[in-house]
Image (cartoon, rainbow, N blue to C red):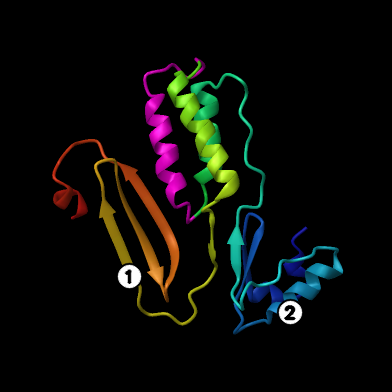
Amino acid sequence: MDLTSQDEEVKKGTDHYIDDIWVNESVVGVDKVRQLLLKYGLVTKEPGDGKFVWCRDGEIPVLSERVTKRELFSVCGKLVGHYPIAGWLRTACSFVKRLANDVEWDANIPSFAEQVIYEVLQKLVKEDPVKGVWEAKNSTKGVVWCDASSLATGCCLQIDGQVMEDCAWLRRDASLINVADL
């Protein structure tokens, strides 16, 4: 049941994606949306520092004792797949998947790749980079930052000093860093 359809003003002023609701405050107030959800027993998060922030909701996946290539790719997808910001984790997942490229889908990954993914998961428990702010209110300018190393090329979109989205690609060749930056 779509709870937002219970109130026409809430329906017009909201949109949703998976388990999140965006509120167009020029149409309906956040408090009205929160009260409607609370009426049905759904408690919402408080905005942090006056900003609406998001972070990983689910638990970090647990790997089996011997990891197959299929399981590795599945776990990496769950870790970074639909998040606009993943920081260092996006490159780490791409790197460990590359270490398992020569393995069949249902075969165990090499022990070095297994060691790397376990280290990534340990660091993730301490420092999860999957988090950010929801909105860039009334912003007309942004900054795109790009950089490259011998391992990867990355960029992020920053609006009002807040990173709104990031991405990274492992590099295939050893071309000059300046060329990769371009």
Q: Quadrant of residue 134?
A: bottom right
Residue 4 vs residue 131, the one in the foreground: 131
Residue at (35%, 77%) from the top-left corner? 141
At numbered mark 2, what does the secondary structure look like: helix, strand or loop?
A: helix
Furthest toward the bottom, the residue is 26
Q: Amino acid at mark 2?
A: Asp
Q: What residue is pinned by disc 2?
A: 31
Determine whether label 1 and label 2 are within 8 Å by CB.
no
At numbered mark 1, what does the secondary structure look like: helix, strand or loop?
A: strand
Residue at (41%, 24%) from the top-left corner? 100
Query: How far is the residue under mark 1 from the one under mark 2?
Result: 32 Å
Where is residue 45 drawn, in percent x and y?
A: 71, 66
Residue at (60%, 62%) from the top-left corner? 54
Left or right of 156, for residue 126: right
Q: Quadrant of residue 92?
A: top left
Judge the density around disc 2: few (<14), some (14-19), many (≥20) Cα neighbours within 10 Å: few
Which stretch did the figure color magenta?
84-107
Left or right of 54, for residue 140: left
Q: Would residue 88 be counted in the magenta stretch?
A: yes
Q: What residue is pinned by disc 1?
A: 143
Where is residue 4 drawn, in percent x and y?
A: 73, 68
